[in-house]
Amino acid sequence: MGRSTAIERLTAAAAAALRHRIAQRREVSSLAMCTRYAVPDQQTVEGEFSPRRTWWKFTERFNVAPAQRTPVVRLHERESEGVVMRWGLIPSWTKGTLGAGRAEIHAPSEAVQTSSLFGPIWRESQRCIVPLAGFYVWQLTNARYRQPYFVQFLGQPVFGVAAVWDRWVTDEDDVIESCALITAPPNSLLADVQGSSQSMPAILRREDYELWLHGKPGEVHALLRTYPAERMLTHPVSPRVNSLVEDDWLLARAVRS
C-alpha cells in the first residue's frame, strides 16, 4: 500500500513536470512580435508626454506581458490623461466572463479601420499612446531555438506606440479598460531579426502625439508608418524574459547569441 502510494505520487509528479515543460514550450513557441516590452519609470513617462491629468501610479518594468496592467495616455473631455489599462483589448460588446473570449494585444494598421473588432473603436476615436522603453522580438535560429532580442531607440529612453482602447462592463458591473498596440510592417532592422512576415509596433513621432490624440479618424491613419531602422538598436538578451516571473533590468542587458 505504501509502495503503491509512493509510485502514484512519483507518477503524478512526473506528469505535472511534463505538463509544465509542454506549457513552457508552447509559451516560447507562441512568442511573436512584441509580446513583451519594457516601461520606463513614471517621472520619465510624464516628462515625455505631459498629460494634463494623471490617475496612474507605476514603476519601471522590464517584462510587461499580455493581460498585465500598463500605463496609457488617452484623451478625456479634450484633455490628455494618464491612466492604467489592461494589455489585451476586450471589446465592450463581450459577453460572459473574462476568460470566455480572446483578448487582442495587437491591432494591425491595415485592418484597424475596417475590421469588425477594431472598426467601431476606431470610428469612436478611442485612440491612446502606450509608453515604452523598449520591446522584445524573437529570432528563430538554425538550431530551431528562439533567441530573444531587445529593441530600443537611439538616445531616447521612452517612445510612444499608437494603440486603441475600449471599456468593458462585466456582468458583475466591474469596469475593465483595455488596449491593443497597433502594428505596422517591420523595418529592415527588425525584418533581419524576426523575419519579414512579422510586424512591429506602430511608433509615433514626438511631433505626432497631439494629432494622434486629438485628430479625426480620417486624418490620423497616415501616422501609422514603419519607423526608420537607423533610429533603433537591437541586441540579443537572456531567455529569462520568456518567464512571466522574471522582471528586472538584466533582462534587457546584451548577451552573446
Image (tube, grey):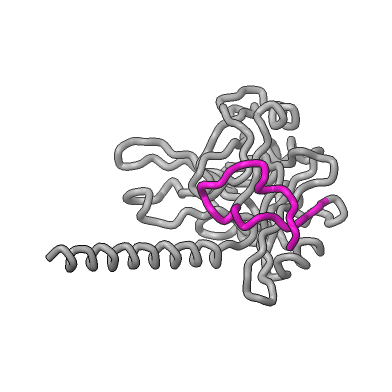
Identify the residue shown where x is 62% and y is 28%. 81
Residue 17 picture quarter: bottom left
Rendering coords of residue 116 (x, y %): 51, 59
Residue in front for this viewpoint, 245 or 42: 245
Residue 190 to residue 128: above or below: below
Rendering coords of residue 82 (x, y %): 61, 30
- Visible residue check, residue 129: no
Q: Pick the quarter of the image with the N terminus.
A: bottom left
Identify the residue shown where x is 84% and y is 45%. 154
Residue 25 to residue 86: above or below: below
Range of residues picked out in magenta: 232-257
Rendering coords of residue 118 (x, y %): 55, 54
Q: Pick the quarter of the image with the C terminus.
A: bottom right
**Residue 189 left/right relative to 73:** right
Identify the residue shown where x is 35% and y is 42%. 170
Residue in front for this viewpoint, 76 or 158: 158
Rendering coords of residue 7 (x, y %): 23, 68
